[in-house]
């Protein structure tokens, strides 16, 4: 029995457009190794990251792929947040040094 094709789209809205782009870019290395019957593509438009999945490998494969994508998005969000905190701390430290 041939498995049917399932198309899924995930749209995530961020507070900044560069965050949406960074998340989409973070998924790119995973797309280099294509599996037969599975295609993942992403793009950012403004503050939105849009990820599309086309799966002909069955529902379990789609679920695993979406879980992997969400995991990558979570790591990217944490990384962005950590970098933003570091930049803020550095700026605060520089500001304090200027006042001294």
Image (cartoon, helix red, strand yellow):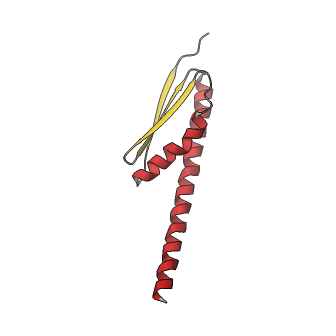
Q: Residue furthest top?
A: 1
Query: Which image quadrant is residue 55 in?
Result: top right
Q: Give 42 or 69, whichever is nearer the viewer.
A: 42
Total labels drawn: 0
Q: Is residue 9 left or right of residue 28?
A: left
Q: Residue furthest bottom?
A: 100
Q: Is residue 93 left or right of residue 15?
A: right
Residue at the spot x=52%, y=19% of the render? 5
Depth check, front residue: 31 or 64: 31
Image x and y of residue 58, in percent: 60, 22
* x and y, in percent, of residue 80 in the image: 52, 57
- Residue shown at 51% from the left, 67% from the top: 87
Residue at (53%, 31%) from the top-left corner?
40
Can you say whether 28 is above or below 94 in the image? above
Quadrant containing the N terminus is: top right
Farthest residue to the front: give it: 98
Residue 68, above or below 57: below
Task: Give the residue drawn at x 51%, y 47%.
Answer: 23
Residue 9 at x, y = what percent?
A: 46, 33
In depth, the one of 55 and 45 nearer the eye is: 45
Q: Position of residue 75 (x, y in %)?
A: 59, 50
């Amino acid at each position: 029995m041939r498995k049917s094709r399932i198309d899924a789209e995930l749209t995530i809205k961020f507070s900044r457009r560069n965050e949406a782009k960074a998340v989409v870019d973070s998924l790119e290395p995973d797309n280099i190794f294509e599996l037969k019957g599975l295609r993942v593509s992403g793009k950012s438009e403004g503050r939105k990251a849009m990820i599309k999945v086309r799966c002909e490998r069955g529902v379990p494969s789609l679920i695993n792929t979406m879980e992997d994508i969400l995991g990558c998005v979570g790591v990217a969000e944490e990384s962005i947040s950590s970098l933003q905190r570091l930049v803020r701390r550095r700026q605060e430290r520089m500001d304090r040094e200027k006042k001294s």
